[in-house]
Amino acid sequence: MSGRTQARACPERTCVGCRERAAKSDLLRIVAIEDECVPDPRGTLPGRGAYVHPAVVCLDQAVRRRAFPRALRSAGALDTTDLRNAVAGKAGTTA
Ligand SMILES: [Zn+2]
């Protein structure tokens, strides 16, 4: 086996929707910009990030349990309309 270093080079994050752990690369990073949740697929935006599967089911679960304001340390509710549209659109093409 030559892939000894590969397993360690794969950081895991917990999806804030279904609470399952997954490779960071399989999850979509979300950051809060003002009062809005913004997808950060490249992981380049500054600030705290929350991770969720790029799937509407996980997104809806996260919204329902108010996981985004909690994970992103936001005082108030966060708008997820654009985020949901982005995820729903992407899911439609890949699933
Ligand atoms: Zn999930």
Image (spheres, rainbow, N blue to C red):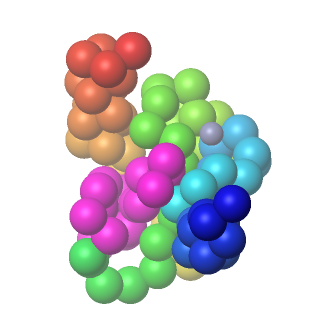
Report if residue 67 is visible in the image: no
Query: Is the residue 33 above or below the residue 62 in the image?
Result: below
Residue 33 in the magenta stretch? The answer is: yes
Q: Quadrant of residue 11?
A: bottom right
Viewer-nearest residue: 14 or 74: 14
Query: Is the residue 86 above or below the residue 30 in the image?
Result: above
Viewer-nearest residue: 68 or 27: 27
Name the outermost residue toward the bottom: 47
Residue 74 image offset from top left, x and y in percent: 51, 74
Residue 87 image offset from top left, x and y in percent: 33, 34
Q: Residue at left 29%, top 56%?
A: 41
Viewer-nearest residue: 13 or 64: 13
Q: Quadrant of residue 14?
A: bottom right
Quadrant of picture, ligand 1: top right
Query: Is the residue 6 above or below the residue 47 in the image?
Result: above
Give the left or right position of residue 90, taking residue 67 as reference.
Answer: left
Residue 95 image offset from top left, x and y in percent: 39, 15
Give the left or right position of residue 76, taking residue 93 as reference.
Answer: right
Q: Which residues are magenta?
A: 25-43
Viewer-nearest residue: 18 or 13: 13
Q: Residue at left 75%, top 46%?
A: 20
Total labels drawn: 0
Q: Residue at left 27%, top 28%?
A: 90
Q: Residue at left 69%, top 60%?
A: 1
Name the outermost residue toward the front: 1
Residue 71 image offset from top left, x and y in percent: 61, 68
Report if residue 15 is visible in the image: yes
